[in-house]
Image (spheres, rainbow, N blue to C red):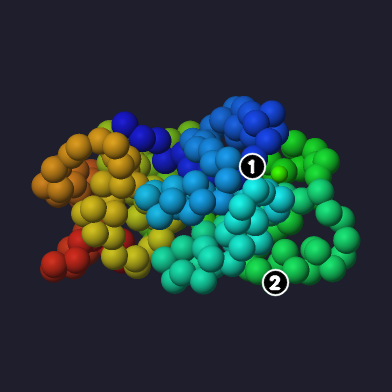
């Protein structure tokens, strides 16, 4: 079973640098995948969109800038945060990096703690539950650090899957999630689970959220999926 932990893709051609990055990101509790060049990176993004990319500028073949441009040009991946790494420190390059749509830019050699802080800062915006933030919607709050959920001040007991489902909904209130998208996010892509399983867990989540009264905050969108609010 997959955690709510965010998925970070590292694109870096130097194995030692990739290893250091992977080690530190995993220590911070992230799920890490690695690509050693641009073509591999683009394939991996098409296969399973990560929550953030740490992208080296200088790569063999397709450059980091070109990868960034292509990812930001596609509507499905436009909001995917990208942090560019570069040995270049010229102001003009910094401007070019940001012009391609990179969300942040870190110059090599960088301090690992600084880079981790920037990764978390990007994810706080897009995957707040994944970096231990407290999420709330109307009278529901979820503390991703302590795994406590409350509704109108009353504790709500949730199983691990229902917890991940609720965290996913709370990260994007109003968004309609298809069963397939929920399977990818909550169960992970590699796990074979029938889409009806999603309905079962949604049912349990609804029951738990309404245990102390209050209306059903989850909306069933016919033919599309589920949404919070
Ligand atoms: Ca490089």
Horizontally, residue 221 falls left or right of residue 39, namely left
Q: Position of residue 67 (x, y in %)?
A: 58, 59
Q: 156 or 180, which is in the foreground?
A: 180
Pick the front one: 38 or 28: 38
Residue 203 in view: no
Q: Name the secondary structure under disc 2.
A: helix
Residue farthest right in this picture: 90
Q: Residues within 10 Å of mark 2 (few under 14, many from 20)?
A: few
- Pick whichever, 195 or 46, lies toward us: 46
Specify whether tag 1 is near ligand 1 (CB below 8 Å). yes
Query: Where residue 7 sits in the image (x, y, percent)?
Result: 48, 43
Please say if the residues under marks 1 and 2 sit with CB atoms less than 8 Å apart.
no
Marks 1 and 2 sit apart, C-alpha to C-alpha, by 21 Å
Q: Which residue position holds label 2? A: 99
Per the image, the residue denoted by label 1 is 12
Residue 28: quadrant of the picture: top right
Residue found at x 18% / y 39%: 193
């Amino acid at each position: 079973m997959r955690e709510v932990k965010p998925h970070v893709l590292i694109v870096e051609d130097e194995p030692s640098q990739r290893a250091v990055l992977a080690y530190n990101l995993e220590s911070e509790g992230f799920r890490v995948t690695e690509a050693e060049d641009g073509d591999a990176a683009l394939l991996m993004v098409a296969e399973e969109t990560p929550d953030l990319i740490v992208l080296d500028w200088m790569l063999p073949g397709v450059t980091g800038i070109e990868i960034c441009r292509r990812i930001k040009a596609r509507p499905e991946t436009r909001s995917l945060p990208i942090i560019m790494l570069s040995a270049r420190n010229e102001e003009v390059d910094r401007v070019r990096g940001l012009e391609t749509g990179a969300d942040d830019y870190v110059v090599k050699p960088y301090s690992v703690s600084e880079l981790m802080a920037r990764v978390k800062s990007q994810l706080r915006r897009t995957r707040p539950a994944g970096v231990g933030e407290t999420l709330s919607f109307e009278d529901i709050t979820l503390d991703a650090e302590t795994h406590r959920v409350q509704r109108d001040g009353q504790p709500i007991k949730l199983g691990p899957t229902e917890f991940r489902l609720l965290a996913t909904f709370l990260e994007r209130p109003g968004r309609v999630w298809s069963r397939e998208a929920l399977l990818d996010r909550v169960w992970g892509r590699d796990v074979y689970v029938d889409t009806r399983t999603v309905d079962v867990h949604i049912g349990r989540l609804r029951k738990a959220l309404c245990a102390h009264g209050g209306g059903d905050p989850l909306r069933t969108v016919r033919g599309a999926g589920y949404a919070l609010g």
